[in-house]
Image: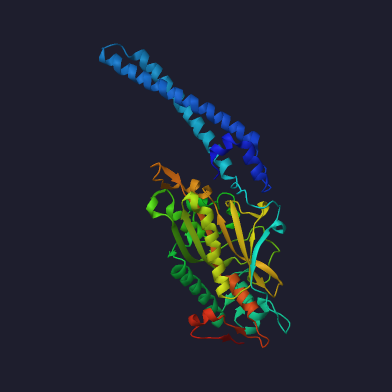
Amino acid sequence: MIDPKVLRNELDRATLNLKRRGFDLDKGYFQKLESERARLQVQVERERQARNERSKAIGQAKGKGEDIGPLKEKSEATAEKLASSEVALAQLQEQLSEFMAGLPNLLHDSVPEGDDESSNEEVRCWGDPPSFSFEVRDHVAVGEALGLVDFELGVKLAGPRFVVLRGAVAQLQRALVQFMLDLHIKDHGYEEAYVPYLSNEESLYGTGQLPKFADDLFSVDGSSSLRLIPTAEVPLTNLVRETILESGELPIKLVAHTPCFRSEAGSYGKDTRGMIRQHQFEKVELVHIVRPADSYRVLEELVGHAERVLESLELPYRVVTLCGGDTGFAAAKTYDLEVWLPGQNQYREVSSCSNFESFQARRLQARWRNPETGKPELVHTLNGSGLAAGRTLVAVLENYQREDGSVAVPEVLQQYLGGMQRITP
């Protein structure tokens, strides 16, 4: 959530910033709500003072043995008026909260201008796309030739956008996950967490999925509040909800492997072939809770940790900075890592690494005690995929395919597969 003080004091700047996303802030509506809130706030405070003064007068009159009837009538009238004003203020504050909850985060100044992904800026590339002496197949054809990737069974069991992996390909995905976890824990210093795969509405609100993206979530039948998690970002970040951390507890670096569930609302017709856009997929998620002064340095570190996975797997990739129109709702700045897919002859996103600054923390009331002031202040939160296991599996199948239909196993994964060097049909 944006700092309300920014809207109150720098409304024009905030309006121009949000326009970089293609979001039109209704300044008139906000000013109307804020003006009424300020008026009611003053009114409530004045009536509370009047109530206290009348209560004090009643006490003094009692002590003197005076008739308190007239004073009591005035006090009751003041109390009724105050109660009415407090209800009106609460309702107004609820309207303001709903309005604020629908506003995306302000963009960092370094975010490029642009309306969509065509304006994203390439930061760097790593590795050369492989060349093949045979006709390249996409991961669907590779997997089906192996007899170990079955989309028809996925449809039979659950419906479109599901897949069944078997044998060595299922083991390959598990090896990818284990390798990512080991790398991030042993080399990058993350603490592993096992978290619920269901989330309540408070948690989803805290990280920004609710209320705006309710249609993207799967609800649990028979429950009015539980949803399947779209990413481990939700439970991991909420570990510090309604918490005041001491300075020595920061930074916090967490990693978790979970399945992720997304309805893919609004993606009709996109990536209908294969495993790029599934309702259920595996992901290794990285979350940082840090001091505000450190968050942009940490963002670069986070990107580097995700890059290390792709480099270890020897998968060509590029890093791009998302433009304003392509940056997610809660993020102030985002880098995407895009891995090369020979079957599509293009780079596709395999990780997004974002700094949310204090946007999520304000919704979560996640704070730290600044030793310089002794006062609680909002932390900054960051997260990134390290990596999306399903899309990384797609990249391995396509980049390591061989002419005879087999798939070579990346050297770094062979230890997780009992020394297996090749998956054969």
Colour theme: rainbow
Q: Is residue 267 left or right of residue 89?
A: right
* Up-down relation of residue 281 to residue 412 (above or below): above
Quadrant where the C terminus sits is bottom right
Q: Is residue 23 left or right of residue 207?
A: right
Q: Is residue 380 left or right of residue 270?
A: left
Quadrant where the N terminus sits is top right
For residue 401, say whether it is visible.
yes
Residue 233 in the image: state x and y as whole percent. Answer: 51, 59
Residue 50 in the image: state x and y as whole percent. Answer: 41, 20
Q: Nearer the viewer, residue 320 or 210?
A: 320
Q: Is residue 26 left or right of residue 207?
A: right
The quadrant holding residue 392 is bottom right
Give the residue at x 57% y 32%: 34
Residue 321 in the image: state x and y as whole percent. Answer: 64, 58
* Up-down relation of residue 310 to residue 92 (above or below): below
Give the number of marks.
0
Q: Nearer the viewer, residue 95 or 332?
A: 332
For residue 386, say whether it is visible.
no
The quadrant holding residue 296 is bottom right
Residue 26 in the image: state x and y as whole percent. Answer: 65, 38
